[in-house]
Image (tube, grey):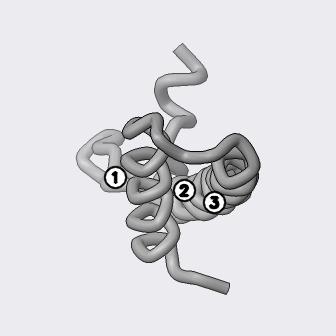
Amino acid sequence: MPKFEESLQRLEGIVKEMERGDLPLEQSLKLFEEGVSLSALCRKELEAAEGRVEILLKDDERLRAEAFGESSQNK
């Protein structure tokens, strides 16, 4: 499985190729399908990373860890 950075770099390359607008339809479709797969892979990896990020909050002079997003979702 490619790493996040490699997937993102390939996805950016696909976008540039398709933006040129000079590709045959079949090649455009193949690149589009590859791009959708890479996008899903990147999104999955970002969601996993987000779940691992913790925010330190100061509570009564003590620090406590809270999963990223919890404090903003509870407000």
* Comparing labels 2 and 3, the label whose residue is closer to the camera: 3
Residue sitting farthest toward the left: 61
- Sequence-first tag of 1 and 2: 2
Residue 31, position as x, y percentages in the image? 64, 54
Local crowd size for mark 1, using a 10 Å CA cut-off: few (<14), some (14–19), many (≥20)? few
**Upstream in sequence: badge 3 or badge 1:** 3
- The residue located at (31%, 40%) in the rendering is 60
Q: CA distance from mark 3 to mark 1?
A: 32 Å
Residue at (46% x, 59% y) in the render: 53
Write down the residue under mark 3: 38
Q: Is residue 45 visible?
A: yes
Upstream in sequence: badge 2 or badge 3: 3
Q: Secondary structure at mark 3?
A: helix
Cα–Cα gap, marks 1 and 2: 20 Å
Mark 3 or 1: in front is 3
> Where does residue 54 sit, x and y in percent of width and height?
44, 57
- Neighbor class of circle 2 (other Cα within 10 Å; few <14, some 14-19, many 20+) is few
Check disc 3 and give the amino acid type.
Leu
Where is residue 56 drawn, in percent x and y? 34, 52
| Residue for point 70% across, 41% down | 25
Q: Is the Cβ of the residue at disc 1 closer than 8 Å to that at disc 2?
A: no
Pick the quarter of the image with the N terminus: bottom right
Q: Find residue 56 and name its label.
A: 1
Nearer to me, 5 or 56? 5
Q: Residue at x 44, y 76 (%)?
A: 6
Find disc 2 in the rendering and name its residue.
Answer: 46
- Residues 17 and 43: in front is 17
Frontmost of labels 1 and 2 is 2
Q: Work out how far the residue at label 2 is from the one at label 3, CA to CA, in angstroms.
A: 12 Å
> Left or right of 1: which side holds 75?
left
Question: Residue 30 location, x and y as percent?
Answer: 73, 55
Q: Amino acid at mark 1?
A: Leu
